[in-house]
Amino acid sequence: MSTAPPRALLLWCPDWPVLAAEIVDGVPATDPVVVLHANRVVACSERARAEGIRRGLRRREAQGRCPHLTVVDHDPGRDARAFEPVVAAVEEVVAGVEVIRPGACVTAARGPSRYLGGEEAAAERIVEHVAQSCAVESQVGIADGVFAAGLAAREGRILPPGGTPEFLAGRPVEALGRPALADLLRRLGVRTLGDFAALPAGDVLARFGFDGALAHRLAAGRDDRPLAVRQPPVDLTVTADHDEPIERVDAAAFAARTLAERLHERLAAYGLACTRLGIEAVTAHGQELHRVWRHDGLLTAAAIADRVRWQLDGWLSGSNGRGGARPARPTAGIIRLRLVPDGVLAQAGLQPGLWGETGAERERAHRALSRVQGILGPEAVVTAVLGGGRSPAEQVRLVPWGDERAPARPGPPPLPALPSSDAAPGVPPVPGGPVPAVPSWATVRAGSGVAARRAGGRAGRGRAVPEPPWPGRIPPPSPAVVLPTPVPAEVHDAAGQPVVVSARLAVSAPPARLTVGTGRPSDISGWVGPWPVDERWWAPAEARRRARFQVCLADGTALLLAVEGGQWLVEAIYD
């Protein structure tokens, strides 16, 4: 026993791509206008149809029929953006709207018809509201199922319950919107939807496949697909207006707690919790203040109140404009306070740490650092995030406390040191050691596969040598101190001649003495390297070619040196 499809109310805006071009690009829709896709007409204005232009015509033929034709390229994004106000206008009258495509949306007819006094009254109300709100002409069709409602909307008809099969029976098979299937059905002698619906369902499935079987159900009026309606977003924002401007911190703390409890109750009613909070304030002089707080856990009512209080304290306790470190204090008291839950998730969606990562000590530190940010700004407290890169400076990114700790570059685990015949990179330099073998992945340009092929050739045919993700990366141990700005240095050999590295990575002589800046020379007791990197060699303006060395001085100091363009630099210091 089959049940009738649910009644659907579909709103259709004729020639929507043309109207969207007028709304977004200012192309007059009253002129002969066509929208082209793949050199064929997909939509045309009413005046263009009067000139004999139809959908499916080629561009040259359309321009031949109407020489003064305006041609617009098809842009689905433009159509969707222009249709959004229409959907919003429909949602002001009825709830639960599904957008089929730009220019057509559908909703269940039962609710609006019962609330507005019948299906005809609901259709008139929606068409009138769309015309008044968006200045767009539209038509409404109501039938059993979305497919039949779409065809009825083109005629502005409201089909009676149970009358959908009779309405569809006389329609041509082209109404299915499947050109290949319609062409095949016509060659088989099936010209109307009624003829197609009369065929046995099993034979249709065997001959035309699943898509043909779905089209067969639509032709028979058995469109029982439920609507995937769009739910309007819930407004979770809370606002408090104050007749007396808030200028004291104690009054701000009281207002913050009251507003925080309201926000927490509203979130809890929807089973949500806040992870990112926007605090907005408006002063009596119209000045608008805004700050976003982020938390790696769930913000409770007390945590929300604390952050609002800290932020208001930071605003109301600002500098007096005479060069203080804090931002300038507002020129008047706060008359409106607004809390916006910028990031929410299900309350059961956060798993606390197993070993006490969210303990009292961590929370106390987080509160203290967050308060400093509220007074001095988000950039006042930063933490380091390790990521990928070839130099130590590239592997560290400083992010404000509470922000997402995402590395700037994907960072694999530290690369293991490869042994060589003379020395191994990544181990303490051997005093007086010779120049070590160059690591296989650092011999040529970074990012290419030539290094692995060269290493494989040296190792022997058939032996695969994996190439790490960051060729030329310094192996462990990592330096303890990375200098924000590399310090110039000079490296000389035992004879006092400057040490240079050739284009083929040959060191002119073993390094013997190092002079950092204007300091005194220091003897080098051991060294390893070079680790060369040729970055962005395909872009001459951004290309960098340099080589790095690890050196150990006679006093036990270990440094990371780099040579670029003949200039030696001290990049980092080891423990």
Image: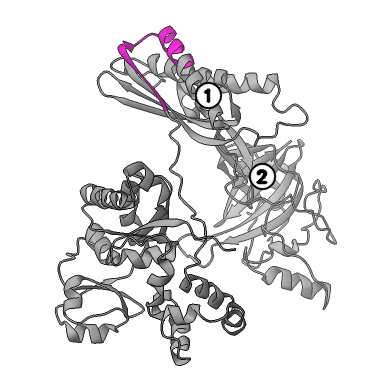
Rendered image: mark on residue 264: 1
Asked whether 518 or 560 is in front, the reply is 560
Tell me where residue 564 appears, x and y as whole percent: 57, 55
Asked whether 146 or 237 is in front, the reply is 146
Label 2 – label 1 distance at C-alpha: 62 Å
Asked whether 19 or 517 is in front, the reply is 19
Magenta residue span:
238-257
In the image, residue 317 above or below residue 297: above
Q: Which image quadrant is residue 463 in?
A: bottom right
Tell me where residue 245 appears, x and y as whole percent: 31, 12
Image side of residue 558 versus residue 269, left or right: right
Rendered image: mark on residue 39: none
**Residue ID for mark 2:** 514
Question: Which residue is at 38% across, 70% downward?
Answer: 167
Query: Taking the image as drawn, is residue 58 in sight?
Result: yes
The numbered mark, 2 or 1, whose residue comes first in the sequence reads 1
Other-residue count near label 1 (Cα within 10 Å), few / some / many at <14 / 14–19 / ≥20: many
Quarter of the image for the N terminus: give it.
bottom right
Query: Of helix, strand and loop, which one carries label 1?
Result: helix
Magenta segment: does it hold 534?
no
Task: Please name the amino acid that badge 2 sits on.
Answer: Leu
In the image, residue 383 above or below residue 152: above
Tell me where residue 448 appears, x and y as whole percent: 63, 68
Query: Of helix, strand and loop, which one carries label 2?
Result: strand
